[in-house]
Amino acid sequence: MSQQESATPVPGPNPPVSPGETSPDGTAASPDETPAGQEQAAPVEPTGPAGLTPDEAALVAEACTKSGVVWVRPSGEDRWHPAWHAWHDSAVHLVFGTGEQMLPLLTGDVDVAVPSKDTGSLLVTVRTLAEVLPARTPGWEAAADALSAKRLNATDPDRQRERWASGALLARLTPLRLLSAGPGDDGTPAGASSPVATPATTGGRAPFHLGGRRRRLRRPSR
């Protein structure tokens, strides 16, 4: 072999290049290509609704499914408001406004406390993202179906959906973060707290109660 031939460089594999750079053979590295010697990070799998772990999501879902009433507190408020609700599509759904329960506007961050249906003790408190659903959209219709199934003693069931579309608001509260599981702090409402007054009413006669209806107490004579 001649001296000239031995001086000729032997082609070898191109050195690794960073994404966007050009290799010696004139080809550009793809932005999705991982440089040699580096491991591509595994994609992060969702852990539950809006960041809840599977265990937390299951706990919230079970509590909300079993309890017909929740307490809601919009961000920036000190007062908790009781409300009946429907658990649907991994979220709390509420109807409020004309002819229904009176609640503040529910948008943005809203804390939800869920009491036990049996004992009234607090089960979970969760931070949610609240949004008002536009009337007659698919999401609104699905929420209206779930709420209609939970609505007791409606005054006009045949026109209920029409009333909701024209004079009430339907809100979806999607869980974001579990704040507490159990009694909570001193500022969290107890399940036995008295609800505030509301114009919502029960149609027809009051249902039968064990022991009979309470008699109206007479005002003591002077």
Image: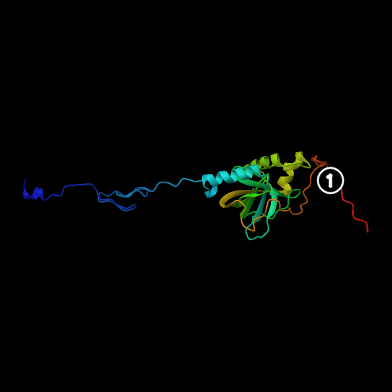
Q: In the rendered image, which quarter contains the C terminus?
A: bottom right
Residue 142 image-quadrant placement: top right
- Give percent across and percent down for residue 180: 58, 53
In the rendered image, the vertical position of residue 186 relative to residue 37, given as above or below = below
Residue 1 coordinates in the image, percent (x, y): 6, 45
129 and 167: which is toward the camera: 129
Q: Nearer the viewer, residue 29 or 116?
A: 116
Q: Secondary structure at mark 1?
A: loop
Q: Please state the horizontal and vertical placement of residue 203, each as a whole percent of the image.
A: 80, 43
In the image, farthest residue toward the left: 2
* Residue found 63% across the figure and 46% down from its top: 92
Q: Quadrant of residue 220?
A: bottom right
The residue at 23%/47% (across/down) is: 13
x and y, in percent, of residue 198 in the image:
76, 52
Q: Which residue is mark 1?
A: 214
Q: Quadrant of residue 204?
A: top right
Left or right: where 58 falls relative to 202: left
Is residue 137 at least partly visible in the picture? Answer: no
Residue 13 seen by the camera: yes
Give the crowd class for mark 1: few <14, some 14-19, many >=20 residues within 10 Å.
Answer: few
The amino acid at mark 1 is Arg
Q: How is the image coloured?
A: rainbow
